[in-house]
Image: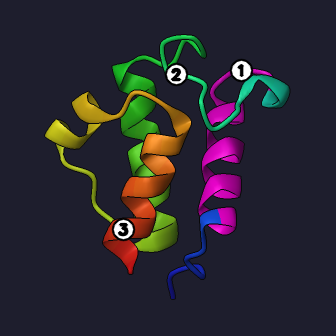
Amino acid sequence: MPATVTKENVQETIVEAIAKLGPDPSEITPDATFESLEIDSLDLVELAQVIEDEYGVAMKSEDASRLQTVQDAVDLVVERAS
């Protein structure tokens, strides 16, 4: 069963997933860009898998190219899961 979809839950899940990819959790703010966090396209694929597993939201390749910040990813998941 997918996790409860609230902005807070989604943000927490995304921050935890990004932290596992290397960046310090204190650097992972809503306005942090994936570029500033040194998250590359392969890392985004891993993040997309976590999002799909947790919330049942599939990210398409064009979504990944649109996502610039952590908040962009949170907003996308909340919008699609609602």
Whether residue 5 is in magenta: the answer is: no
Q: Residues within 10 Å of mark 2 (few under 14, many from 20)?
A: some
Residue 43 lies, in percent from the top left, at: 45, 27
Give the amino acid at mark 1.
Pro
In this figure, which residue is indicated by the disc labeled 1? 23
Q: Residue 36 shows which numbered tag?
A: none
- Disc 2, SS: loop
In this figure, which residue is indicated by the disc labeled 3? 79
Residue 54 lies, in percent from the top left, at: 52, 68
- Which range of residues does the magenta coloring cover? 8-24
Q: Residue at x 84, y 28 (%)?
A: 26
Q: Residues within 10 Å of mark 1 (few under 14, many from 20)?
A: some
Q: Residue 33 shows which numbered tag?
A: 2
Give the amino acid at mark 3.
Glu
Q: Earlier in the sequence, mark 1 or mark 2?
A: 1
Give the amino acid at mark 2.
Thr
Q: Residue at x 52, y 21 (%)?
A: 33
- Disc 1, SS: loop
- Disc 3, SS: helix
